[in-house]
Amino acid sequence: MIELQGLTKCYGDTRVVDDISLTVEQGEFCVLIGPSGCGKSTTLKMINRLIAHSGGKVLVGGDDVTTLPPERLRRRIGYAIQSIGLFPHWRVADNIATVPRLLKWPASRIAERVDELLALFQLDTDGLHDKYPHQLSGGQAQRVGVARALAADPDVLLMDEPFGAVDPLTRDALQVELSRVHRQTGKTIVFVTHDMDEALRLASRVALLNGGQLVQYDRPAELLVAPANDFVRDFIGRADLGLKLLSRRRVEEYSRAAQRTRNNALASASITWQVDADDRPMALLGGRLGEPDTARTVVTPEWTATPDMSMKEALSRMVWFRVTALPVLDSEGRLLGEVTMSGVMGHRP
Amino acid sequence: MPVSAFRLPTSSTSDARLIANRVLITLLCAGWLSAWLLSFATLSPNRLAAGQAVMLRDAASEWQFAVMLVLTGLLTVAAFKRPLPRALAHAVVLLASLGLLLVTLYSLGDYAQRALADTSSAARISQGAAFWVIVFCCALAAIDTFQRTASGWLLRLGYMLIAGGSVAMLFASGHFHDLSIMREYANIRDDFADQLITHLVLVGAALGPALLIGIPLGLLAHRHMRLRGALFSVLNFFQTIPSIALFALLIAPLSALGNAFPLLGEWGIKGIGAAPAIIALVMYALLPVVRNTYAGLKGVPPATVEAARGMGMTARQVLWRVEIPLALPVMLSGLRIVTVQAIGLTVVAALIGAGGLGAFIFQGLGQYAIDLVLLGAIPTIVLAVIADFTLQMLVVLSKPAGTRR
């Protein structure tokens, strides 16, 4: 957990960070975002004391950061920046082992940890272990950067525009991967970016900064639904943000229990799934706009959903096949639940 | 005039051109012209008398001359665009120029043996202008080829070792025994070894303190912007003082110091001798050391340093594990500059009684004995070339693996 209490940074008479207070809960993915010069990077660097704050307090895991020597503090906090931050004279394995070596782990434990992280980031191929940073692709270098930050298994991870220098396709892949690693490890992450799409895709909470002040700190959807002022509206107010938001959400988050029946009889709910003996959906009863609830539609694979499908894709299928519900299937094709048009609208994402 | 006009011709030759390697053609012309117009050797009745010129055609034996013709023929073919492909042409140039160098050296020694077999022992044979021109043309042809091929450091090292080794073997075999310069050497053999060691000690004694003072100063210049300007103006000022003037300037204060504190005088702090020489050499060496240390550290990407700090390295760990290793190639280039510079400047230090190879040069100039001058000059050049080459190799090896060329 990270707490900023009235955090302030002055250079001469200019307050580049002005009285920022926010709490990042355990396991939260907090994105600091704002126009350039808004103080987001400075705020991040005050957490691990790369920049000394002029006022206020920073608590990491309940401890005031100024009570520890800065080096000890930083070894407890993961830190990742753009790929240029990799040490060019060290091989990939040495780069990842940086913090464990500073902490004087035994060599066998370091080697084990390096292999574990290479596997976690799918870097355990092509003899990448022994390559030098300049031999890596942009995406690989970024992954090594994040793996290095996670090496000593810190509770907290600070990331300063880590994907700023890679092409859009690679960035997409890296974002998906970071989300996965975040889910798998449950780290608390503070992430700086100036890219709203990136923020919406990754964040569980977004802190929008402007002129050194915290404008709004909320869940991504709240920023859309209830922007605090015109600045927030301008900053995020671009076309198809609703769809973008749905593209960051997975079906399982919207899935709810489905109404089943074994025979052709109309059930009580307006949407009912007729299933076979193995619980595989055969037909949808109701659930067609402009048609009576008795309408029977045979299920085809084109309009089913899986738990890890994006909600944007699910919505697209509903529109294309003119149904108001999709069955959510497991890998065996059995019915897990359903997502519905009204669920998309009613759900507070 | 555009800067590019000063660049050496490179391998970027157009398809239409007949000659692929214009540098080589120029060198060949120079070699041929010198062989026909200038003396290859000089035969004189004694050490000091003026000699009589001997041309290459007369000095070289039949087979030596024939080998020279074949090798220059090969070099000429290699300079053209056809028929040899480029890689093969480069290999031919490297091998033929080394062969030509060796056969030229050999034929000079051989000529001296044959010519002196039946004359008085006072007669002397020295190398003439054409000999020097051919030797330098061979060396330049090889160096130029390495520039063109951007070849790996291992190949360069191997070639250097083979070339140096074969020349050294020729010397060791006593083949040049009858050359005037080697007779001069025989006279001063013991003194030569002493002065060579003195020379090396002076260079080492200057480089040690220069690095010990210069590297921390470079660090300071990198850390404190305000210090930088003042520091570099002072060091630049040192460089502008002519070396002889600096040696002379140091005589007065150091002898005063030695007289005022007899104990210091006993340690060797005197107006003349090693003390002023070392001090002057250190002063000259400081600017390149400080400048390259500073430039090397400045070249380390700030993001890398920030990452190192962010990972929790202490200031010292950042310096030793990240900044110094990454700055090392540039710092070693600085060391290369000052080593070569110090080897040359130490020659002048002989003027204030510091000794070293310069002693022979000034002695020879005084006696009008050109061979004695060469005995001081040639080893100085060889030392400088060896130091330069060794440090160049170190620069390459100090770069992160995989980025070496």
Image (spheres, rainbow, N blue to C red):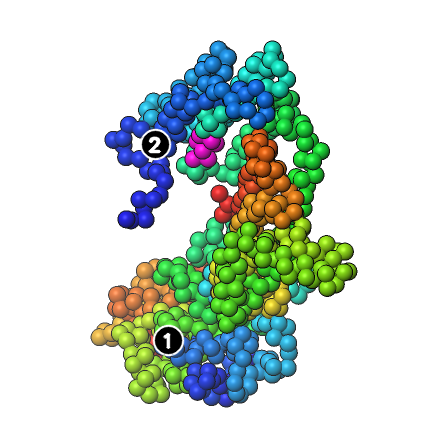
Quarter of the figure with the N terminus of chain A: bottom right
**Nearer the observer, B83 or A156:** B83
Measured from the top left, where is residue A82 in percent x and y? 46, 64
**Three-letter amino acid code at the position of disc 1:** Ser
Q: Determine which of the numbered discs, if any, sits on residue A175 in the image.
A: none
Badge 2 crowding class, 10 Å Cα cut-off, few under 14, some 14 to 19, many 20 or more, is: some
Q: Residue furthest left?
A: A290
Q: Are marks 2 and 1 on the same chain?
A: no
Q: Quadrant of residue A105?
A: bottom right
**Three-letter amino acid code at the position of disc 2:** Arg
* Residue plotted at (49% across, 47% down): B403
Looking at the rendering, the stretch of residues picked out in magenta corresponds to: B136-144
Q: Which chain hosts label 2? A: B
Quarter of the figure with the C terminus of chain A: bottom left
* Residue plotted at (62% across, 26% down): B182
Q: Determine which of the numbered discs, if any, sits on residue A36 in the image.
A: 1
Measured from the top left, where is residue A113 in percent x and y? 62, 59
The residue tagged 2 is: B22
* Residue plotted at (50% across, 72% down): B226
Whole-angstrom CA distance, mark 2 to mark 1, is 55 Å
Q: Is residue A233 above or below residue B66?
A: below
Taking the image as shown, residue B310 lies to the left or right of residue B56, namely: right
Badge 1 crowding class, 10 Å Cα cut-off, few under 14, some 14 to 19, many 20 or more, is: few
Taking the image as shown, residue A105 lies to the left or right of residue B100, namely: right
**Nearer the observer, B204 or B319:** B204
